[in-house]
Image: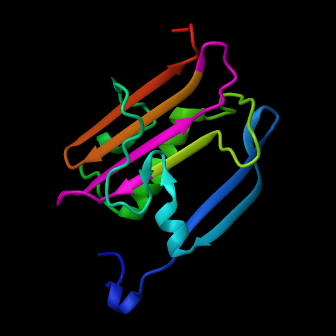
């Protein structure tokens, strides 16, 4: 284990992070604001993580629509590693990096439109070893309000387990488009 046990180390608060970003020279690279909020027990237990209660020990699944398997992106080098579970901290950072690269790309991402105050255009939830006995990391990313005449939402799912890596997606089309 990388840290002392709970009795020695203690258990930290439930925390929510929010980042506000804008583009500079066409690239989504400027962090305009970052906020960290410690959540109360009531807030923690009422929080919704892409359709699943955040405090529920269950892998995040996203919508129940039919997910389409996709090839593992080149940016996801995990499958090239002989042991994909070298360090949890490394893996969670790596998962975040590859999900964001696959979603918004290395440059600017998809433009968004129609956001109301308090709405998010991109959400990423990562479940780490919450079910079963084998190590696993499951991540689901939802990108909405896409400024496209045919596509309104994109969902990405990445499932990593000992000996395997699966990527899936759902593309949600606007009514009358496909």
Which residue of the protein is positioned furthest toward the bottom in this rendering?
A: 8
At 31% from the left edge and 55% from the top edge, which residue is drawn?
A: 58
**Which of these two is toward me, 70 or 45?**
45
The spot of residue 138 in percent (x, y) is 35, 48
Tell me if residue 160 comes above or below residue 65 in the rendering.
below
At 61% from the left edge and 32% from the top edge, which residue is drawn?
A: 144
Query: As drawn, is 12 to the left or to the right of 66?
Result: right
Looking at the rendering, which quadrant does residue 106 occupy?
top right
In this rendering, the count of numbered labels is: 0
Looking at the rendering, which quadrant does residue 29 occupy?
top right
Tell me if residue 117 comes above or below residue 104 in the rendering.
below
Colour setting: rainbow
- Viewport quadrant of the N terminus: bottom left
Which residue of the protein is positioned furthest toward the right in this rendering?
A: 25
**Which of these two is toward me, 27 or 115?**
115
The spot of residue 147 in percent (x, y) is 70, 23
Tell me if residue 54 comes above or below residue 67 in the rendering.
below
Tell me if residue 43 comes above or below residue 141 in the rendering.
below
Q: Is residue 139 magenta?
A: yes
Query: As drawn, is 57 to the left or to the right of 19?
Result: left
Looking at the rendering, which quadrant does residue 34 occupy?
bottom right
**Which of these two is toward me, 76 or 61?**
61
Q: Is residue 141 magenta?
A: yes
Query: As drawn, is 139 to the left or to the right of 28?
Result: left
At 74% from the left edge and 29% from the top edge, which residue is drawn?
A: 113
The spot of residue 171 in percent (x, y) is 48, 22
The spot of residue 70 in percent (x, y) is 36, 24
At 57% from the left edge and 13% from the top edge, which residue is drawn?
A: 175
Q: What range is drawn magenta here?
A: 126-151
């Amino acid at each position: 284990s990388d840290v002392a046990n709970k009795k020695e180390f203690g258990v930290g608060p439930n925390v929510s992070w929010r980042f506000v970003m804008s583009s500079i020279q066409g690239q989504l690279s400027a962090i305009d604001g970052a906020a960290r909020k410690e959540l109360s027990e009531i807030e923690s237990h009422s929080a919704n993580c892409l359709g699943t209660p955040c405090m529920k020990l269950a892998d995040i699944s996203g919508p129940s629509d039919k997910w389409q398997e996709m090839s593992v992106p080149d940016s996801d080098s995990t499958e090239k590693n002989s042991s994909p579970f070298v360090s949890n901290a490394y893996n969670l950072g790596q998962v975040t990096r590859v999900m964001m690269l696959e979603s918004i790309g290395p440059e600017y991402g998809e433009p968004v439109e129609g956001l109301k105050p308090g709405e998010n255009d991109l959400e990423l939830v990562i479940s780490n070893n919450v079910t079963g006995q084998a190590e696993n990391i499951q991540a689901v990313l939802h990108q909405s309000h896409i400024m496209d005449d045919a596509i309104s939402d994109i969902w990405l799912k990445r499932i990593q387990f000992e000996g395997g890596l699966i990527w899936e997606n759902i593309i949600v089309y606007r009514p009358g488009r496909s």
